[in-house]
Structures are given as structure tokens and as C-alpha cells.
Image: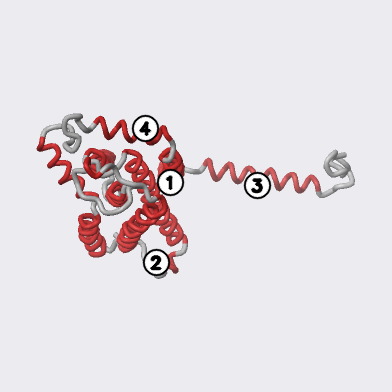
Amino acid sequence: MSLWTGRDGGMSRDCPGRGILDHERVRGTSRKRDRFGAMTSQQMLAFGRRALRIARTEIAAVSALFIVAVGVMSFVEIADDMTEADGRAFDTAVLEALRPEARPDDPWGPPWLEEAAMDLTALGGIAVLTLFALVVTGFLILQRKRLSALLLVLGLAGGVALSEGLKALFGRERPPEALQAVETVNASFPSGHSLLSAVFYLSIGVMLTRAFPQRRFKIYVMVVAVLLTLIVGLTRVYLAAHWATDVLAGWSVGAAWAMALWLVAYAVQRRQQGHPQEAHVLPVDEG
């Protein structure tokens, strides 16, 4: 008698069909065993490769989701510290370390370093990024990468909206004008150059990794994308256009937004691969 159901567990003679059911269950188990035993080594190898490919894809999606979460939480933490004494002390210490006491309006280092910083910081400007985006978007359209082109445009436009909206929300003042080596026009937090460079260059880096099967090329592309993002942010602090926490916040939001766009592209492609008859709704990348 079963303690869970209060019924006979199958050992009674009142169930003449029980033996037949048990026999069928054994036969079904044997058929499954035979089917798996009949798999050749090549089939097993193909199955293993497919499982590994799926695992890598899912790991990439989980990693992107992790970056989104970390980016959002980091921004919230930085925004909270910005208004406290510790955060302000950190920003002041970084700015003073880059300015000699004799000439606070002249950044640390030789004159050519300041000139180089002024040239490199333009890589995160709206005008330069818009030009780059138009060139890359045209190339993607010619390559029939319509989904990538659409997400790149939406990513940059969304980054501009995020930057301007957050600046208006926090309304933080820039470093003293006497220390700034470049002209500034709006609020300080977060750094728009840092945010937009993270969105654009990281998005381009992720797109290019899909074009190269070799691991060394993937690593090289992502290193270059991260390096460009870091250079833009560091030059903003060096030129006293932003506080250090402005740049950290811009990097956090930009990285989170870029990975969120990648997750959207990933979800759209997965959905359309499962429903090929609906591919005309939003064309996926071809080729």
C-alpha cells in the first residue's frame, strides 16, 4: 500500500495487466538504449560540437546580461557617491594630481601630450561619431547587415538621449573653468564623450568579432574597442573637461547600453531562426 496515494503499489494479484505494462516499459527502455548505442563516433562528435556551440552562445548572452547589470548598478553607486564627501574628495584629488601647482591651467606633461589629448578626445565627440556611424552604417547596408545597421543607429541615438537626459537630471557643474583645456557647453555628469564612445566602439567591436572565426582576431578587435573607449574617457579627465566620476559613470552606462543592444539583436535572431516564415518582419543579417 502506497503511503502517498493510499493505493496498491502494483504487487497485488488484482492487476492482471500489470505484467504487460512492465514488459512494455522494459522494451521501451531497451529501444532507447539501442538507439543511443547505434550512434557512430562521427555522430557523437557532431553532437558534442553542436552542444559546445550552443553553450558558447548562451555564455555570451549571460555575460552580456551580467555586464548590463553591473553597468547599471555601478552607475547608481557612482551617482550616489558623487553627492557625498568621499566622492567629491576623490574627484578633487584626481584633478589636482594632473595639475601642477605653478600653472593649474596647464595639464601635467609636455606640451605635445596636451595637443595629443585634445586630438584624441574628439574620437568621442558627437560630430566624429556621427560621421563614423554613417560610414559604418552604409557599409553594413551594402553587406546586407540590416539588423546590425539599424541597431547601430538606434544605439548611438539612444546614447545621445541617455547622455542629455542624465545631464539634465543631475545638473552637475563642470570642473572650474580656469582649469579646463577645452570648451564645454553643458552639464558634467555623466561624461557624454565617455558614454557615446563606449556605445559606439564596443558595439562595433562586438559586430567585428562575428566576422572573424579566429580567436586572436576576436581578442584584438575587442582590445582595440576597449582601448579607444578608455582613451576618450581618460583624455576628458586629463583636459579637466570632466570629473573622474563623470567618466566612470559614462563608461558604466555606455557599456550597459551597448550590451543591451547586443541582447536585442541576439533575441531577434534567435526568434527569426525559429520562425523563418516571419523573417520579413525585421530582416536579420544576411551573409
Q: Horizontal placement of 50 versus 179: left or right?
A: right
Query: In the rendered structure, which amino acid carries the disc numbered 1?
Result: Val
Image quadrant occupied by the C terminus: bottom left
Query: In the rendered structure, which amino acid carries the disc numbered 3?
Result: Gly
Which badge, 4 or 2, is on the more N-terminal residue?
A: 4
Q: Of circles 2 and 1, which is in front?
A: 1
Q: Which residue is mark 3?
A: 28
Disc 1 packing (10 Å; few <14; some 14–19; many ≥20): many
Residue 84 picture location, percent across and down: 44, 37
Query: What residue do we see at 75% from left, 48% from top?
Result: 21
Disc 3 packing (10 Å; few <14; some 14–19; many ≥20): few
Q: Which residue is mark 4?
A: 89
The reply to whether residue 217 is visible in this rendering is: no
Disc 4 packing (10 Å; few <14; some 14–19; many ≥20): few
Mark-to-mark CA distance, 2 and 3: 44 Å
Q: Which mark is residue 68?
A: 1
